[in-house]
Image (cartoon, rainbow, N blue to C red):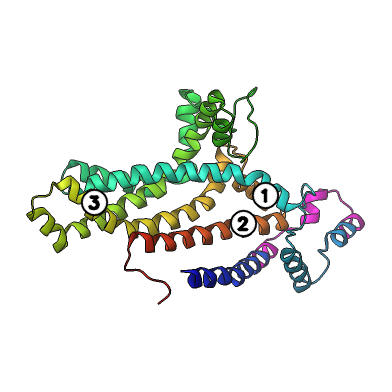
Amino acid sequence: MRRYLLQRLLLLIPTLVGVSLLVFLMIHLVPGDPAQVMLGERATPQTLAALRREMGLDQALPVQFGKYLWGLLHGDLGRSLRSHEPVVLELLQRFPATCELAVASMLLATTLGVGAGILAAIRRGRAADYASIALATAGLSLPIFWLGLMLVLGLGVLIPLFPISGRLSPGLSVTTVTGLYTVDALLSGDLRAFGDACWHLALPAITLSTVPMAVIARMTRSSLLETLAQDYIRTARAKGLPFRLVVVRHALRNASLPTLTVIALEFGYLLGGAVLTETVFAWPGVGRWLFLAVQARDFRAVQGGVLLLATVFIVVNLIADVLYAWLDPRIHYDT
């Protein structure tokens, strides 16, 4: 296992370099001039040229990318063209909000998705099965931004049950330890702030969890149905074991490997989907920050944000691979 982990960690370096190169080239192919965006339409050619020299935009693309990689090796992602603040600092300030939203969404999606998949599998061909399939299809079909806007309109404006923006109500604050407001509120024993943070988290988490919930439900159902058809399941049933015990102790664990793969992939996709969700709900995370950076052609911020999301995606899938060996003793990575 140690050898496998070392190999995967070493592969992380060329993968992130490739991601950085692709993002660098794509952001420079987008029409528009960052200096023009920053100075406005009335800027003179002299001021535009001076700003381009100051930001290094007058240099050749290979030179700019080489300087970016050199800074990356030293932990420097450059400075944002909009705020002139270090990109690393801005990412550290906003990533906890995105992480809290993604974790809450994945917990909701996993709980409801696995539950719906199990119910559909053990009630195959009945109303519960058809209902779960219909809900899963609807979850995959609804665009995230449309669902978010509908929730804002329905449960935030017409029936004001939930807040439609922000992470805490005005007048409330938490002592920042982890940057996750729900965790920090619990650590400080402030139940009022914890409830308010969960209240603000509800609509964005529901919106972001719909697609992974549907995918997890469908995968759990199909994997569990395949496992329930195996000979050892029929043997366990023939020995008189209760069906519920057979499902929980025997079938569910063996059927969880494909589901675990989907959960790991969907968690990575959640970070990308957070761009739309955070924009709709004005959630102060990396997704909304990236959206504003793309609008302003702040390529340094875009490169840093995408690099962070790619790193998290790779690490999450590495953790999933390690969990495979724990769930299935037949899996060995060192052979």
One can see residue 54 in this view: yes
Q: Amino acid at mark 3?
A: Arg
Q: Which mark is first along the chain, 1 or 3?
A: 1
Q: Label 3: which residue?
A: 249
Badge 2 element: helix
Is 101 inside the magenta-drawn segment? no
Is mark 3 in CB contact (under 8 Å) with mark 1? no
Distance (Cα) linking label 3 and label 1: 43 Å
What residue is at 50 percent from the left and 73 percent from the top?
A: 3
Q: Amino acid at mark 2?
A: Leu
Distance (Cα) linking label 3 and label 2: 38 Å
Residue extending farthest bottom: 335
Is mark 2 in CB contact (under 8 Å) with mark 1? yes
Q: Is residue 335 above or below residue 30?
A: below
- Name the residue nearer the viewer: 323 or 211: 323
One can see residue 41 in this view: no
Q: Which mark is first along the chain, 2 or 3?
A: 3
Q: Label 2: which residue?
A: 308
Q: Is residue 289 above or below residue 152?
A: below
- Name the residue nearer the viewer: 150 or 8: 8
The boundaries of the magenta stretch are 25-49
Task: Say few, some or many: other residues with alpha carbon within 10 Å of mark 1 (under 14 / 14 to 19 / 20 or more).
Answer: some
The quadrant where residue 219 appears: bottom left
- Name the residue nearer the viewer: 60 or 183: 183
Which mark is nearer the camera, 3 or 1?
Answer: 3
